[in-house]
């Protein structure tokens, strides 16, 4: 197994992840759990190979969740991966750019 790079969430990305989980949990606890599992698996894949996913906006990269309308937007910073946003696909594109 490849070594993993540390991953940290921007505080606003963490808020987005919690809000998404809560939204699904209010509707269906099983679906919320699946979102959590998929999000955690995506974070592990990103930590193992952060350059694998396509660039967007120059220095950012995007991992698209398979079963949910979200992308994990991240960048490499100071020998770690910083998750900038859990961006919903219907939200205004690039709203997260001012976070860095």
Image: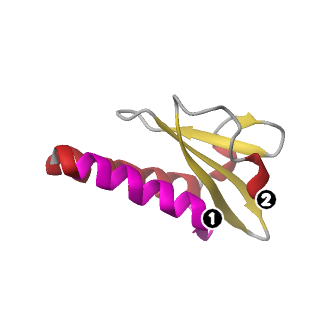
Could you tell me if the residues under marks 1 and 2 are in contact, i.e. CB atoms within 8 Å? yes
Residue occupying image coordinates x 52% and y 28%: 90
| Residue 60 falls inside the magenta stretch | no
Q: Secondary structure beneath disc 1?
A: loop
Q: Residue 76, percent across and down?
A: 74, 58
| 73 left or right of 89 in image | right
Q: Is residue 37 visible?
A: no
Query: Which residue extends farthest right?
Result: 58
Res. 81 image quadrant: bottom right
Q: Which mark is residue 100?
A: 2
Q: Residue 70, percent across and down?
A: 47, 38
Q: Earlier in the sequence, mark 1 or mark 2?
A: 1
Q: Is residue 38 visible?
A: yes
| 38 left or right of 7 in image | left
Q: Residue 98, percent across and down?
A: 78, 52
Q: Secondary structure beneath disc 2?
A: loop
Q: Which mark is residue 10?
A: 1
Give, as a single range, the part of the protein colored magenta. 1-25
């Amino acid at each position: 197994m490849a070594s993993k790079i540390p991953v940290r969430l921007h505080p606003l990305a963490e808020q987005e992840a919690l809000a998404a989980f809560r939204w699904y949990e209010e509707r269906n606890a099983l679906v919320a759990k699946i979102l959590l599992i998929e999000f955690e698996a995506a974070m592990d894949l990103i930590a193992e190979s952060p350059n694998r996913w396509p660039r967007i906006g120059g220095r950012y990269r995007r991992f698209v969740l398979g079963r949910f309308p979200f992308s994990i937007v991240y960048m490499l910073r100071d020998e770690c991966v910083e998750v900038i946003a859990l961006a919903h696909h219907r939200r205004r594109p690039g709203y997260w750019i001012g976070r860095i």
